[in-house]
Image: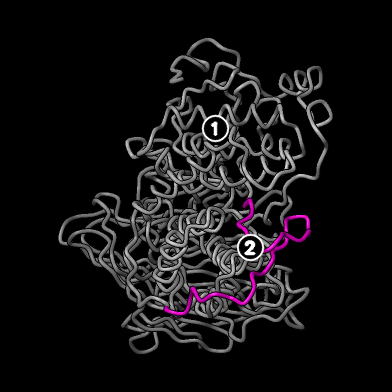
Amino acid sequence: MRARGWGRRAGLAVVTGATALAVLASTGSPGAAASGTAREPIPVLPALPEVGISQFGSGVTHVDPVAKPATDMGARLSAPQGQRSSTGEAIAAGTYACSGFGGVDRSTSPYEITRDIYEWGGFAAYRVGNGAGDVNWRLNPYNNPSWYMWLHSLRWLGQGIMQASTGDVAMLDRVGVTIQDWIRDNPYSWKGDVGAWESTMHRTNVLVCYRHAVLNALGVTTLPAKYAWVDTSLRNHATFLVNNWSGAWNHGTDESLVLFGVGCLLERQDYRDLAVSRLEQGITTSIDSQGSTNEQSTAYAQFNYHLWGRAEEVLRACGTDPGSTIGQRRTLMATWLAHATNSLGAFHQIGDSEVVRTSNAPGTPIEYPATNGASGTPPTTRTAAYSRGYVFGRTTWGDARTTFRNASSYSIRYGPPRALHGHNDHTAITYTSRGRDVVIDSGHAGYQNDQWRVWAKSRRAHSSLATPLSPEAAPTTTLRRSLVASNWEFYEFADSPAAGINRTRAVTFLRDPDLFVTLDRASSTTAQQFQTNWHLPSDESATIYSRTTAISQAPGAASRTILFQLPYKQALPPGALLVQKGQTSPIQGWHYPNITQRKPAPNVLLARSGYSASILSFVVPVGPTAGVGYAVRQVGTSTVIDLTVEGKKVSVSVSAGGAISRL
């Protein structure tokens, strides 16, 4: 039935926390022993490393494949190859296995399913139906697109499906009631509801899992007539996927895999052939010839690496050769992911990425950073620049002087305009050193369309030069020149971040002492505010030491960061240095470690105004009580800064053309 009154709005109880635990303890839930022969649960494929809390963006996106497609997939294998489940057991070859529920089911117990209670993402549990499977599929009490789309995905039914598969026929039928309610309330085609549309691939996989649960629970190999509706719905979902492909990114890959899977289960060669064709089109755009992702997010890059590994397994399991292109592109991406891992063993937080640790892939370059250098072999270079807009570097992968974790590492964004999971983060830097984050990205605020997501995607939320008086453009940013030496690296980038504005960032990273120097230059046809932002970790407090210098440190930390600017071709104006933390009007000084946590975090802002700016700044991690000394001198047309950092002396030169060199 098309329920419209359930949930908090109708005055029904919301069960959360200790109350939910108490109810579960006193009431229990239906079990296999009470309703059928106890069996082992259905095997589930190992979970892919998610991008953090399972998320879903609002709106529908299609990504046209732009690279030459692969042509080596689809040949029949002499025999299908079996897979291994998440618990290591063999999965019979010749089928499409249950792919699991992506963690969306983690917080919704079988008991809660029988009461139509759904919980996800740290939001309070919510009663979405009348307790008998009559769900209001239009509820969105938290106005959160991910919450709504995961409701429509049916993934939250996962614990109930797994319990049902053990022979609990009562649970099998109860979960079936909820699934059939979705089918009745969302007839084909469900394109009129973006939540139903965007979650189609995941819901199709849930139907596959439920189908396996029916066969396993009943100990049969063919669906009984009572459950014929499952295959009918699978065919409808396959038809939807045939007619609606998201293209060359993770959504399109997921869609192609489950379309292939339905073709395998229902013996539909047309589904399988179309899915293989789409995979051939998608792989070469999703992962380019350098191994770089097209999604502009480090977390999604990792997800895609494992998703395409899943694609190889799924095709082989149903007797289809995945060819060599997928494996070749994944090999390249493994090196990309290794470089994208910072010295703390997590990815540089870029784009729609939470703070995500690097998931180990033994035998690949990923193994070394994923184990903090304990095993494996690192890439052969310390630095890497990718044409899709990433520079990664580090002082060392670990050597006799410095462990993997105590090394310094950095990322810089540039390249094509913002797309998919990207932010307006071109020229932005992240930096780690001495076992800590030093300069950070403000993170991923989730997909709700509010002022926080607007800010988190904006240039002001990234460690780059912003011009807040002008509407932001999504420019192409070029890497104009670079130099990599044994103990320092130099890069220079240029773009037009807004109409009538030109911007250049030069940056040099040093080893021994570890620090970096940036020169931000900008010019505008109209008067502007020019702001170089340095976003710092949320556990730190930053204080202004002088009109040139700020010092940031966390309580009890073994290091602190000294940030200072020097006048360079422009006098320092009043208010040239500010510290902002936890501001709400305008929003500034926050960090999202994940989409459900927002923490006040210091931002050191270096300010200029007028028609041009020239901001020379230094970021120097030092010991907990150490300082930095410097002297400035002119050598011909170059400006030389002589630095003393914890007793170590080093000089850098800024040429008249803006190049920064170690002397």
* Crowd band around label 1 with a 10 angstrom C-alpha radius: few (<14), some (14–19), many (20+): many
Residue 549 placement (x, y as % from top left): 50, 59
How many numbered discs, if any? 2
Residue 661 placement (x, y as % from top left): 46, 84
State which mark lies toward you, 1 or 2. 2
- What element does badge 2 sit on? loop
Query: What colouring does the structure picture have?
Result: one colour
Instruction: Name which quarter of the figure residue 112 lies in.
Output: top right
Range of the magenta residues? 71-99
The amino acid type found where label 1 is placed reads: Ile
Judge left or right: residue 130 versus residue 136: right
Residue 231 placement (x, y as % from top left): 52, 43
Residue at the spot of label 1? 179
- What element does badge 1 sit on? helix
Residue 581 placement (x, y as % from top left): 50, 43
Is residue 470 covered in magenta?
A: no
The residue lying at 68 percent from left, 70 percent from top is 361
- As drawn, the label of residue 188 is none
The residue lying at 50 percent from left, 35 percent from top is 147
Judge left or right: residue 335 versus residue 456: right
The residue lying at 62 percent from left, 73 percent from top is 645
Work out whether mark 1 precedes mark 2 in sequence or the reverse, and give the earlier one.
Answer: 2
The residue lying at 58 percent from left, 47 percent from top is 208
Residue at the spot of label 2? 94
Q: Is residue 405 above or below residue 259?
A: below
Disc 1 to disc 2, C-alpha distance: 26 Å
* Residue lying furthest left: 525
Q: Nearer the viewer, residue 407 or 50?
A: 50
Please say whether residue 463 is visible from this viewpoint.
no
The amino acid type found where label 2 is placed reads: Gly
